[in-house]
Amino acid sequence: MGLLRRSRSGTAAKSARAPAPSAAARKKTLFKRLPWELRLLTVAAVYLGLPIGFLISCAFAFFSAAIPDPIQLRRKESAPVVRIVARDGSLLSGRGGEGSYVPIDFLPPHLIDAVVATEDRRFFEHWGVDLAGVMRALLTNLRVGRLVQGGSTISQQLAKNLFLGPERTLTRKLGELVLALWLEFRLSKRDILELYLNRVYFGAGAYGVEAAAHRLFDKSAQALTLAESAVLAGVLKAPSRFSPVTNPVLARARARSVLAKMVEAGRLDPARGEQVARTAFRFAALAKQRQSGADYAVDAALERLPMLIGQADEEDLIVETTIDGGLQRKSQALVHDLMSGEARAVEASQAALIVLDLDGGIRALVGGRDYAESQFNRALKAKRQPGSAFKMFVYLAALERGLTPDSIVQDLPLVGSGWSPRNEGGGYRGAVPLREALAHSMNAATVRLHLGLGAARTMAAARRLGIRSELRPDASLALGTSEVTLLELAGAYGVIANGGRALEPFLIRRVRSASGKVLFERKPETTKVLVAPAVAGALTEMLSGVVSSGTGRRAALGEHAAAGKTGTSQDFRDAWFVGYTGQLIAGVWVGNDDAHPMRKVAGGTLPARLWHDVMTIAHEGLPARGLAGAVPSERAGLSAPRATPAPAGPLPGLPAQRLAPEFFARAHDGVEPPSASPAFSQVVVR
């Protein structure tokens, strides 16, 4: 016991004599016990944090010296006026100036709640950058494999609108983050919200909440109801998509989503939210507003404007477009008269039209029968089946693989395939040259050509010429069963009209402030050849046969040589004519918004006639000019004797035996027809 006591006491004495470890030593020991990954991350944070902090401090000092107090940006005058002018400088329309700057204390609380709940739920909690929101958006984008969410806060959006341009670069994004922190340092949360609501773009040329309230609801922002506030908050995510001016149905659905977000954020009672969601959403009666005949074109320019220059400043803006004012107004009148008169008897209620020049400038843009009735722009946004107007890409792919306009294809049924496309009238013509198959829009011959070449080649040709919509790689693709927009199709035909050179449709030439400062100017694009000139010329020769002796005879323009293609989707749901002369390209679509079948309206009827009437007006005073590269195929170096089905030698990627006279005469082995579907069991397009 004594020894035990002495041992313990000795140990105790020794422990008492040992000095206690310092706080620094304890921290060092604790740090060494951490996993090496965490230690590395901590060291990196310390060493990187110091220079980053120094750089941010320098940036704060620079911004404070270079930029005036942001709150001084409050404006008492009216919002800037945006003047949209035609290519000759004449005024098409003026938008904006409807309302002045509104202090946040005068705005209804439910408007603020709707914007915060939708755009930045943690606005009152973060310091300008919501790290949780950034991480959430990053994980969502990684999960779906594409950009579907952004992490920008209201402070970041204000920083971008006030001080930065519209370009999307890493440098601009970093500047946006630093400026957002600086704004939070200089301003209160309510000041930031006030500036944001008075400067943000709400679509249809309305900058700021007051202008938007007058434009959409014909009232001041101070009098907005909860439902109207939900509509405005919903527009902010995508003004061109969710604006009631262009898509009232989608705007209502988006407003109901905003109300649900307000409930989730605790800013709206669920019962009240449900009640408002069930009420009717009413917008300003646009029918009372004077129409200029260029309203669809004006809206399209205004939707594009923020992407080109960012947000408007205090100065008025002048937007110079490519629109021909006279042609635009006459085109709108032609569409309105046709669809309000003769077309009603054949159950066609809507039409869209676009005219381009060979530089890609949009000369006329008609998005529907009547802008007051519907502001949805069918020329730019409606995706419909092009029918046989899509066949151009099949024949382009064939010419690029070595066939000629005189090569032979068999217009016969695809026996034993489970799917057999029929020609109009049900008959087949047997062995025919490619030019005749295209001119008379033979379905069976075109599908055989498409299957022999492979769907990938047809799709590649369409993509190269500017088709961005989804394309389904099946046999029916050749007959135009994948939906596209009129703008895409007209632009693609424009490449052929341009002799194979690239053509990118555009509407805005230049944007300048009232003081003369150029904010945007379209630079002439470097000429890029997308299709060999000889191939483009041969295809133009074939398409001119459609107008001279084929399905598009009603489009013929007399002294002005023309080429083009008709298109009619199954059951006469869509009817098209897209074509060109040596100076202009134009496309016409006729149909119904709900895809209701028309009464035998084919591409060669109303669309071809409307195309003829519009192009006749467009060519007034213009000298006749030949089609680019349209020479006889023998002179183009692409001729083959009419008796030969294909050029000598096997086509790359195709078995040699398929070049025999019976080439394309049977359904090809190893090529599957489209999956069994009642919709495609007997496809007939024209």
Image (tube, rainbow, N blue to C red):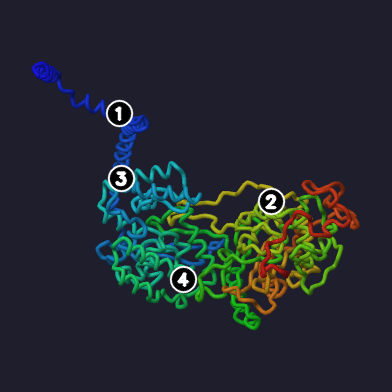
The residues tagged by marks 2 and 1 sit, at their Cα atoms, a distance apart of 67 Å
- First reached walking from the N terminus: tag 1 or tag 3: 1
The three-letter amino acid code for the residue at tag 2 is Arg
Q: Which residue is under mark 4?
A: 248
Residue 677 occupies which quadrant of the picture? bottom right
Q: Which residue is under mark 3?
A: 182
Q: Nearer the viewer, mark 2 or mark 1?
A: 1
Q: Secondary structure at mark 3?
A: helix
* Label number found at residue 33: 1
Label 3 close to label 2 by CB (< 8 Å): no
Left or right, residue 493 beside residue 416: left
Residue density around tag 2, few if under 14, some if 14–19, many if 20 or more, within 10 Å: many
Label 1 close to label 3 by CB (< 8 Å): no
Q: Nearer the viewer, mark 4 or mark 3?
A: 4
Residue 31 position within the rendered picture, expressed as x and y whole percent measured from the top left: 28, 29
Residue at x-position 36% and y-position 70%: 228
The residues tagged by marks 1 and 3 sit, at their Cα atoms, a distance apart of 39 Å
Left or right, residue 204 beside residue 594: left
Nearer to us in this view, 2 or 31: 2
The three-letter amino acid code for the residue at tag 4 is Pro
Q: Is residue 275 visible?
A: yes
